[in-house]
Image (cartoon, grey):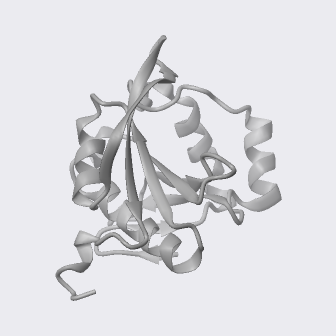
Amino acid sequence: MLSGQTVTLRPVREADLDALYDAHTDIRNRGRFFPLGVMSETAFRREHAEHGFWQKTEGMLIIESPEGEIAGHIEFFRPVSYWDAFELSYQLYDDTYAGRGLVTESVQLMVDYLFGAKREHRIHLVIVPENTASRRIAEKCGFVLEGTVRGAFFNDGRNQDVVLYSLLRTDPRPWHAADGQ
């Protein structure tokens, strides 16, 4: 479990599965920026039973709000097998959680965890250019814009460009500036 000032990131529990699967299959809350693919309920439950959505090179944690509610999730995974990198992905399950800094703090907690516990040198975010909220999160967390990856993401009925942001282990983490780290 990773605890911040406003959020807690915790493993998925069996008691969470119904609510998580409902959120997973409700593609309306994904908007134009999150992949629309849906996993079958059987595969979803099997994946949790086999490894609890947590393995050495990929994992998912619940974003728990200050009120103790499941606000969304954040996950990490190897985007390309030969890169020394993890990619982060996140989703809030309801607009009532937006604009409260929950994802920003979740990204900070996950970055600190990954750089503290794993050997990968790079973490990156892949963002649809029009997703200004995610771009602000990337910038607040010190990620550097590397450029545009053309036509890389099929969503909303078309191939879309994405922008790639990265944070290296050796880059400053702005949220540590206040505490001198």
> Residue 32 occupies which quadrant of the picture?
top left
Residue 143, image quadrant: bottom left
Whether residue 162 appears in this view of the structure is yes
Q: Where is residue 74 in the image (x, y as percent from the top left)?
A: 49, 54
The furthest residue to the bottom: 180
Q: Name the residue at the top extreme.
A: 157
Q: Where is residue 99 in the image (x, y as percent from the top left)?
A: 21, 48
Q: Position of residue 166 (x, y in %)?
A: 39, 54
Q: Is 83 located above or below residue 110 in the figure?
A: above
Query: Residue 107 lies in what quarter of the image?
Result: bottom left
Whether 33 is drawn above or below 134: the answer is: above
At 42% across and 20% down in the image, what residue appears?
A: 160
Vertical order, 42 against 169 (above or below): above
- Which sits in the foreground, 5 or 153? 153
Q: Is residue 77 left or right of residue 98?
A: right
Q: Which residue is nearer to you in this view: 134 or 16?
A: 134
